Image (cartoon, rainbow, N blue to C red):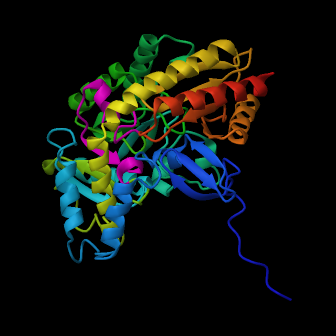
Amino acid sequence: MAEPPAALSPVLKQATPVLAARGEGVYIYDEDDRRYLDFTAGIGVTSTGHCHPKVVEAAQRQVGTLIHGQYTTVMHRPLLQLTERLGTVLPEGIDRLFYVNSGSEAVEAALRLARQATGRQNAIVFQGSFHGRTMAAASLTTSGVKIRAGIGPLMPGVAIAPFPYAYRYGMSEDQAVEFALREFDYLLATVSSPRDTAAVFIEPVLGEGGYVPAPPAFLTGLRERADQHGFLLVLDEVQTGFGRTGRFWGHDHAGITPDIVITAKGLASGFPLSAIAAPSALMEKAWPGSQGGTYGGNAVSCAAALATLDVIQEEGLVENAARMGERLRAGLAEVAAAHPAIGDVRGLGLMLASEFTASNGSPATEAATRAHQIAAEQGLLLLTCGPHGNVVRMIPPLIVTAEQIDAAVDIWASAVAKATS
């Protein structure tokens, strides 16, 4: 009897029914050559679009010369060039980089650096945060129990503070910020002493937690408290970086400078590459041997990242994200105004979401799921998020045009109407 074929893990669930054969720009094509508007961008990864010619050419050229040069064994030019280029877009004074492969790895590297640099053990995160699935990163994650459940005990030394999620609390933004900062101070007085706190980790926009932007006043308040108490402010820019929010970094909206920046996703247009960046005086406090990895700073990924930076700058993609984000937000707001099932539209740049809420204020998960599925059937690929799965998010490539935005909004309007009728 023939052995059954191997298969993927049964707990891996596709968000859409598409079997992708190729991608081009903002579109994905299935094996029947049906075209879909891809407003998932590989969960915010393919910011320059699928298979941008300049990224493809750079990767192909690099594959023919050096695929893997392990960067604690030998050095290679793409890594040196990328480091120099990133210095032109990183916040002033943040001038040292360490490369790994995934967002989770970068988060763990940032936590390791923060603990070693400060000699303190605790990290503070915020309700709704997503920092990854590896053990330490999962311990920092509160976007949903699916990340934390069944793997305990989790890493100790993590305290959780409220995030200023104004819609959830039924507050104005100013009220939510005041509440969250007051509770943060209370946490310092009751749970994690400032002298035990190594770092605060925060996303400029909650990702898996529901696409909720951190108000500038909140990030400013955290910067002030970090300076006052001597702990580090770590900005997890895995999803928000590289122009996604209409500024190069998500924290640029607040005009602050973090102590550590974490980047991944949009960094290399789909090739696995992530990094942490910090000032030299901070990075040199990492203990010898604490930074490394077999695949970190892969030569092909670095070449793709260099091409990605070229495309972002030459094609004005940060500015396009801001303009197209305004257009998309206006379209989503019109749909929401016509359908009471959508209680909130929010986000920054091309990182936008619609939250579905029942008349009693509870999450309308089924309606969100139906709208998401119907949109896919009609040729628009989206993702859900939020602890209850009642938030539908849109993260198109930063090359998206006005015509493509309008086409997506038309499909979305039809999907919501069918899902809520």
Residue 115, can we see it? no
Outermost residue toward the right in this view:
1
Magenta residues (range): 240-268
Residue 147, compared with residue 58, is above or below; it is above
Could you tell me which residue is drawn at 30 percent across and 55 percent down? 307
Q: Quadrant of residue 9?
A: bottom right
Q: Nearer the viewer, residue 187 or 169?
A: 169
Left or right: 85 with respect to 250?
A: left
For the C terminus, give its image quadrant.
top right
Q: Name the spot of residue 247 as percent of width and height, x first.
A: 32, 31
For the N terminus, give its image quadrant.
bottom right
Residue 251, can we see it? yes
Q: Nearer the viewer, residue 213 or 201?
A: 213
Left or right: 409 with respect to 228?
A: right
Q: Nearer the viewer, residue 178 or 410?
A: 410
Residue 58, compared with residue 204, is above or below; it is below
Left or right: 11 with respect to 199?
A: right
Could you tell me which residue is drawn at 20 percent across and 38 percent down? 91
Is residue 259 magenta-colored? yes
Q: Nearer the viewer, residue 109 or 24?
A: 24
Is residue 158 magenta-colored? no
Q: How many marks?
A: 0
Q: Quadrant of residue 366?
A: top right
Q: Name the spot of residue 112 as percent of width and height, x first.
A: 32, 55
Q: Name the spot of residue 66 as percent of width and height, x first.
A: 29, 76
Q: Name the spot of residue 115 as percent of width and height, x first.
A: 30, 50
Could you tell me which residue is drawn at 43 percent across and 42 percent down? 239
